[in-house]
Amino acid sequence: MPKVYNWQLGRDMAYPYEGAYPERQFAFVFNINRCIACQSCTMACKSTWTFNKGQEQMWWANVETKPYGGYPQWWDVKILKLLEEANPEGMSWDEGAAEDGVKRPYGRYAGRTIFEAPPASLAPESSRVLGYLPSDEEWNSPNIYEDNPVGSKGQEGKLHPTGERLPVHRTWFFYLARICNHCSYPGCLAACPRKAIYKRPEDGVVLIDQEQCRGYRKCVEACPYKKAMYRGNTRVSEKCVACYPRLEGRDPESGGQRLETRCMAACIGQIRMQGLVEVTADGTWTEDRYNPLYYLVHVARVALPLYPQLGTQPNGYYIPPRWVPRPYLRQMFGPGVERAIERYTFPDRELLAVLQLFRRDNRIIYRYAIEKGPEIYRTTYRGRPLTLYNDTVIAYGENGEELFRTTVEEPLYERPAPLQNSI
Ligand code: SF4
Ligand code: SF4
Ligand code: SF4
């Protein structure tokens, strides 16, 4: 099997095809600390792409409550169990391996990925990738276990005597928003015997050719994130299309500008930012210091890939929730968790400014700049000094045009008198 370089694992990895990388890659960062599970993203996708007959159980975008929730039910527990069986020595990271910038930011993964599982563990035998096919029941209830916490119980009718405090809550849950990760090494694409799945060279979006697909469901089985889905009435598989008409600037309302996807644009909690990043000949990210996604993933290092050990090199990144027990988060986001939470808890001036860029506009941001402002607040937080400055952050588009500017202190708008009661 050919070898490809997986920078999230810090090593070469077996993959059924030679590496081939797009000019730019669709990528996104979700800040879990801010998600309120309003499901506006879920419904924005549903009402745009999957409202037809045969798509009733199809949620390309979903938000699930961890640790118990999942769509399809138990998807991550099940794939992790299979991967654990394929890794009798453990799914461990070689913590001693030196980090090496964008080429190896999290050390080295010493275990096997879904592409490297021993053939004996693949079922059925025709499978190329470790996976499983969820049952119909598992696709039925996208919101099961919503808001169900895990941890110590309070006493009925009484307030908790101490309440919960950071750095970790004893009783916890969090919302995990998910879409297809438009992976650099997609499991769905690797498994398709018809070669019906392809990755676009211009933006790395992974699509299923509806004419080529014969509904064998190998992609459904092989996508570890379970984001390829089967449609019974047409007998072909479908998946998130990254709202490609918006990405291409063909949305009638965009005026030719590239827009972020529907699920990003609808986000009430302002947790989402999506863009396009440049990649090099081996799939690592080209240095682009002032692209906000590059900054969050490779400079501030607050945003981490979801289950990198699966090996698909997903292009969705998450700022992990601060209150959750670290072993759970390490399993989900890899060894960068402690550093990411530390940086997010004590943000420097630049990080605080970049975090203001989330959802101020629907156009894709290619670059940002910061103009320094005055000190506005000074405090001590958990024993450390923290100073806030009202800096201005400016977002630029594809051709260097200014898209918008905003400040660290949230701008205050006073409604004109005739509109005072309007919402
Ligand atoms: S998340 Fe799944 S469906 Fe999406 S590209 Fe990756 S393997 Fe394919
Ligand atoms: S990117 Fe578009 S198609 Fe994909 S989940 Fe979001 S709204 Fe749906
Ligand atoms: S719209 Fe945003 S805040 Fe609401 S559930 Fe989706 S990701 Fe979370």
Image (cartoon, rainbow, N blue to C red):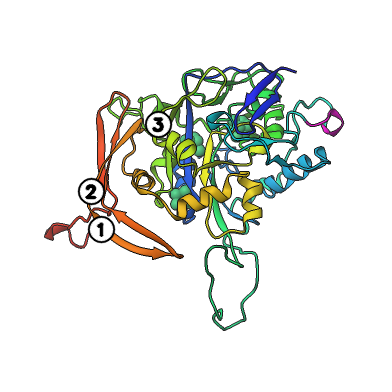
Q: Nearer the viewer, residue 92 or 220?
A: 92
Q: Which residue is mark 3?
A: 289
Q: Residue at x 61, y 67 (%)?
A: 170
Gap in angstroms between the C-alphas marked 2 and 1: 9 Å
Q: Nearer the viewer, residue 415 or 87?
A: 87
For label 1, the crowd category at 10 Å Cα-Cα, with few meaning under 14, some 14 to 19 and many 20 or more, is few
In the displayed structure image, the side of residue 294 where residue 308 appears, left or right: right
Image quadrant assignment for residue 100: top right
Dot 2 falls on a residue whose secondary structure is: loop
Residue 145 at x, y percent in the picture? 62, 59
For the question of whether residue 233 can be seen, the reply is: no
Residues rendered magenta in the picture: 117-122
For the question of whether residue 85 can be seen, the reply is: yes
The kind of residue tagged 1 is Ile
- Quarter holding the C terminus? bottom left
Residue 279 at x, y percent in the picture? 49, 23
In the displayed structure image, the side of residue 406 where residue 344 appears, left or right: right
Q: Which residue is mark 2?
A: 373
Q: Earlier in the sequence, mark 3 or mark 1?
A: 3
Gap in angstroms between the C-alphas marked 3 and 2: 21 Å
Q: Cβ(mark 1) to ligand 3 < 8 Å?
A: no
Task: Report the disc number at residue 217.
Answer: none
The kind of residue tagged 3 is Arg
Task: Report the disc number at residue 376.
Answer: 1
